Amino acid sequence: MRIKVYKSLDKPSSFLGLKGSYIMYTGVGAVIALCLAGYISTLTNGLIGILSFLGLCVIIYLMVLRVQASMTERELKRFLSGKMLPNYIVFHPERLKKYLRERAED
């Protein structure tokens, strides 16, 4: 029995030097840059809004490339999920007699 195995399945997707989930982070950054540029263009001239959009996109692209060079996708996901965890957990004190009484009844 023969099964075709495609080479590209083992490699992460790549676009303009960005690999895997870093493409999504750049896309989200571009959408945020578009919103900021739209706000800037309403306050000033439209040409300034377009130039600010291009500048912000270049800055975001370079920042994502820098993060990609320093962290793997797994390290980045671990870092981001660690930010959502609390720094401490609060336990309220309870009397041990309560648990000892329940054990004795069993």
Image (cartoon, rainbow, N blue to C red):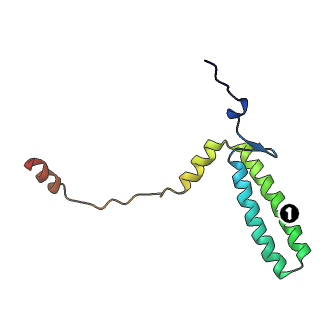
Question: Mark 1 is on which residue type?
Answer: Gly
Give left or right: position of 73 versus 57: left
Residue 70 in the figure: left or right of residue 44: left
The outermost residue toward the left is 105
Q: Looking at the figure, which quarter contains the N terminus?
A: top right
Image x and y of residue 84, in percent: 53, 57
Q: Which quadrant of the structure image shows residue 13? A: top right
Find residue 46 and report its horizontal and vertical position in percent. Answer: 89, 76
Name the residue nearer the viewer: 88 or 76: 76
The percent coordinates of residue 99 (x first, y second) are 17, 53
Residue beneath label 1, please? 55
- Dot 1 alpha-carbon crowd within 10 angstroms: few under 14, some 14 to 19, many 20 or more: some
* View extreme (right): residue: 47
Residue at 27 percent across and 60 percent down: it is 93
Q: Position of residue 100 (x, y in %)?
A: 14, 51
Using the image, determine if residue 94 lies above or below residue 20. Answer: below
Q: Residue furthest front?
A: 1
Residue at the location (75% across, 70% down)? 35
